Amino acid sequence: MKKILCIVAFVAFAFNGLAQDGKLRLGANVGFTTGSGNSSFVIGGDVDYLFNVDSKFEVGAATGIAVVTTGNSIILPLAGAGRFKATNKIDLGLDMGYAIGINNAGNGFYFRPIFEYKINSNMSFRASYSGVDSGGFLNAGLMFNL
């Protein structure tokens, strides 16, 4: 548990140190697990910090939390993030990194393809698939620019 708190603190300080150059966003989502067996409800939160590489690409870091209601599994992803501005309203993205399993979840490689639709300048609808070595889940939610 101490390792997880240290990692979260490091990520928070890193976001704070870069806050002058990029864009910090917070979000919430709901979804369900995929794969064999029973499907479980998933609720989560997202944080990403992105900065422009050019007019079409953004890169940065992403983290968050996902809680799988069946079994009280908690997943804490730490990932690099990339976004491609396909149109003025649509962004396509990919987060890749490592997921830390808390409670009944396993650790492992984390990947998340993302589709975002900009509702207005401060809010976007996000649909994505989050995959970890041990399984994955589909989710949808809202992201807010800070």
Image (cartoon, helix red, strand yellow):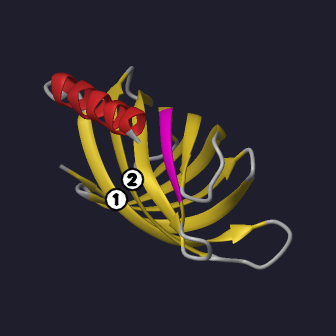
Q: Amino acid at mark 1?
A: Gly
In the image, what residue occupies the spot 34% across and 26% down?
Answer: 52
Instruction: Note whether residue 71 is visible.
Output: yes
**At x 62% / y 55%, what residue is drawn?**
105
Q: Secondary structure at mark 1?
A: strand
Disc number at residue 135?
none
The quarter in which the N terminus is drawn is top left
Q: Which mark, residue 27?
A: 1
Q: Residues within 10 Å of mark 1 (few under 14, many from 20)?
A: some
Magenta-colored span: 74-79
Seen at 49% across and 60% down, the residue is 66
- Label 2 sits on a secondary structure element that is strand
Spot occupied by residue 132 in the image (x, y as percentages of width and height): 68, 47
Q: Is residue 139 left or right of residue 14?
A: right
Quick one: 126 or 17, which is closer to the camera?
Answer: 17
Determine crowd level at label 2: few under 14, some 14-19, many 20+ residues with C-alpha closer than 10 A. Answer: many
Up/down of 103 relative to 4, above or below: below
Q: Is residue 146 above or below residue 144?
A: above
Of residues 76 and 6, the one nearer the viewer is 6
- Where is residue 54, by image quadrant? top left
Instruction: Locate residue 69 relative to residue 108 in the image: left or right.
Output: left
Residue at the limit of the structure toward the right, as seen here: 36
- Residue 72: where, in percent of width, then height? 54, 70
Q: Amino acid at mark 2?
A: Asp
Disc 2 to disc 1: CB gap under 8 Å? yes
* x, y percent for residue 5: 33, 38
Count of marks, rendered view: 2
**What label does residue 46 carry, if any?**
2
**Percent position of residue 80, x then y:** 49, 29
Is residue 75 located in the magenta-colored stretch of the structure? yes
Give the Cα distance between marks 2 and 1.
Answer: 5 Å
Q: Looking at this view, is 96 or 20 the one in front?
A: 96
